[in-house]
Image (cartoon, rainbow, N blue to C red):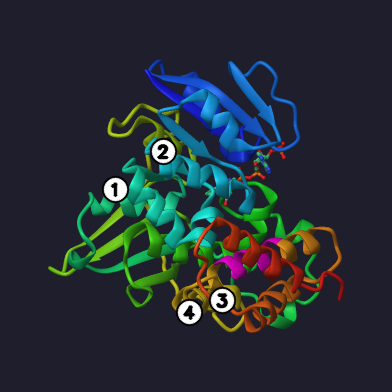
Amino acid sequence: MKRIALLGATGSIGRQALEIIDSHPGLELVAAASGSQPIDGIAPLTQVGGDLAELLERAEPDVVLNAVVGFAGLRATLWTLERGADLALANKESLVAAGALALEAWERGGGRLLPVDSEHSALYQCLENRSADQIESLVLTASGGPFRGKSRDELTGVTPTEALAHPTWNMGPKITIDSATLANKGLELIEAHFLFGVPYEHIEVVIHPPSIVHGLVRFRDGAAIAHLGNPDMRVPISYALSYPERSATPVPPLELRTLEFHEPDLDTFRMLPLAREAGERGGTYPCAYNAANEVAVQAFLEGRIGFLDIAAAVEDALERVDGSPARDLTELVEADRRARDLVPVTS
Ligand SMILES: NC(=O)c1ccc[n+]([C@@H]2O[C@H](COP(=O)([O-])OP(=O)(O)OC[C@H]3O[C@@H](n4cnc5c(N)ncnc54)[C@H](OP(=O)(O)O)[C@@H]3O)[C@@H](O)[C@H]2O)c1
């Protein structure tokens, strides 16, 4: 029996994880948390809001599935890595923001870090724990979101409802807006850098509208290994929770069809090059990128700023933060706060 703690149990990933856990006799849900919605009775230990590390301390899980959205998931990520419990990580924002601090905690703890993000789960499976020196490049695929092919002019007046209509994935609101701006791919670029230790210049992003190829690794011997599957998060969730087994899921077998790939439009979707720039600058620039994006996305969803203002706000914040590395969690939280304060939320 694996003892699972599920953080973010009421969200899109959380609900799909409950389905996987319910149908798997080897997985036992020992604790669950949400931010504000009630979750009474779904696990022996439950918590709404509050300190996630305290809940984990009491639950003593073997695996923590961190499916909280945003920087709020940071302490749970660090707690799990430090303790050496297995971390099934959907909350990419925590790895992007904490970067080096998270890797240090992971090394001290010695547990497994199993990505739940479908692209990183795919890359993890293609890599089979091979070292970075055998890799020519990692290729992250992006659906392109609802605004693929649109010009900046066409994006000026788009509404939250239009931005929330994702063509292939059904996800929570924050990541859906991140997919529309390509910030999601930007966060994933930084996430891949930290997860796999590959330099940014060896991580490519391609637009692949059907979302069938989830990730591809080019190796130095000329071989390229790709991971294919229907776009369904129950597959990477099940993989991370059942690892090293592969358990059955209700996801139908993949029907093969034509695959198309395009270059991303970096002039229109500025959040992608901004992420690369923040990642390459290092220090707390990725933390600032994430923080400014979280505030700007919320402001867009509430109708206080326009769609293109999201990237403008993040670019402006990145120009104004100092970006020096955080030596500890207190400094990281401070860097996050300073970047948040720099985002104008009315335009
Ligand atoms: N959805 C996907 O397909 C997908 C794919 C890849 C990666 N991810 C990543 O997975 C994470 C979750 O995404 P999602 O789409 O599932 O988001 P979501 O549907 O918005 O759910 C977010 C979850 O986080 C909980 N939460 C928020 N603040 C919290 C706090 N302070 N303490 C405890 N729980 C808190 C929410 O609880 P309440 O409901 O009570 O507010 C909810 O359960 C994100 O980092 C996202 O980037 C998602």
Which callout, 1 or 4, points at the residue further toward the start of the chain? 1
Which callout, 1 or 2, points at the residue further toward the start of the chain? 2
Residue 125 shows which numbered tag?
1
The answer to whether residue 70 shows anywhere in this view is no
For label 3, count other residues whose C-alpha is less than 10 Å away and answer few (under 14), some (14-19) or many (20+): some
| Contact between labelled residues 3 and 4, with CB atoms less than 8 Å apart | yes
- Residue 39: give x, y in percent of width and height: 69, 24
Q: Residue most toward the left?
A: 221
- Mark 1 vs mark 4: in front: 4
Q: Which residue is mark 4?
A: 281
Q: Secondary structure at mark 3?
A: loop
Which residue type carries mark 4?
Arg
Which callout, 3 or 2, points at the residue further toward the start of the chain? 2
Q: Which residue is mark 3?
A: 323
Tell me: residue 283, above or below residue 194.
below
Residue 152 shows which numbered tag?
none
